[in-house]
Image: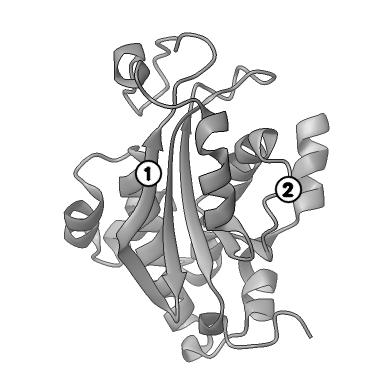
Amino acid sequence: MEGDQAWDRYRYAVVDLEGSGAQDREKEQILSIAIVTISRGKVHTADPFYSLVKPEYPIKRLPWLKHNITNNMVEDAPKFAEIAPAVAERLRHTVFVAHNARVDWKLLTRYIPDPEVQALLDTLKMSRKLNPTLTQHRLPDVVRHYGLEETVKELGGEAEHHALHDAVGAALAFVRMAAEFRSGKATLSELKRLCGIENDDVVQELLL
């Protein structure tokens, strides 16, 4: 059956998006995107995908947006339609992974309605299941819990809430947690039961 092989037999695309703000429910724009690949149970950081994205309208400076992306920074960036084919190719036939994956998936699928992924996994949900003693499960908390801060800075840059930094952090944390769960012997199906989300549920949320 699909998903019955060991988790490390699959390719994973760990994604982080920074957007213009979820309060702009109908028109939220992608401002940056990063994708880090995992294959054979290893994080591949030599060739991550990263791009700033020029939105269709100016970025509002809202106090709760933490990415610090400005209109000047994206002035010469490609529009998402220009990078969509490359993004879709990176995602095709992979397992989509993100921290609080519903948020990234909902925004991404506004622009690529069918990325053709095998499953959706959430490292936030994964940490809550595997690290019940943690009081918070924000990505920095999980990275810190596993002692990955310096590695993430080295491979993804200094700044939290930068898409590449956060994608690298989520990828490293995912591999660490997958190696712990069932002593690293879990199948993809077992990971889906542990921390999967259903695309139909996310679509329904989007329509509400």
Q: Quadrant of the C terminus?
A: top right
Identified at 33% across, 38% down, the residue is 162
Q: Is residue 136 visible?
A: no
Measured as percent of width and height from the top left, residue 48 is found at: 36, 55
Q: Mark number for residue 50?
A: 1
Describe the colour scheme in one phrase. Answer: one colour
Q: Name the residue nearer the viewer: 175 or 5.
A: 5
Pick the residue in front: 176 or 40: 40
Disc number for residue 72: none
Position above or below: 143 against 26 = below
Assess disc 2: are there few (<14), some (14-19) or many (≥20) residues with their C-alpha within 10 Å of its C-alpha.
few
Chain-order first, disc 1 or disc 2: 1
Contact check, label 1 and label 2, Cβ < 8 Å: no
Q: Can residue 189 be spotted in the picture?
A: yes
Circle 2 SS class: loop
Query: How far is disc 1 from disc 2 in space, using C-alphas?
Result: 20 Å
Q: Amino acid at mark 2?
A: Asp
Q: How many marks?
A: 2
Secondary structure category for the residue under label 1 = strand
Give the residue drawn at x 83%, y 40%: 204
Which residue is drawn at the image coordinates 45% and 75% (left, top)? 39
In this rendering, position of residue 78 left or right of residue 98: left
* Residue at image point 41% right, 23% down: 65
Quadrant position of the N terminus in the picture: bottom right
- For mark 2, what is the residue? 114
Locate residue 144: give its quadrant: bottom left
* Up/down of 40 relative to 54, above or below: below
Picture coordinates of residue 109 (x, y %)? 67, 40
| Amino acid type, mark 1 | Tyr
Determine whether 57 is above or below 166 in the image.
Answer: above
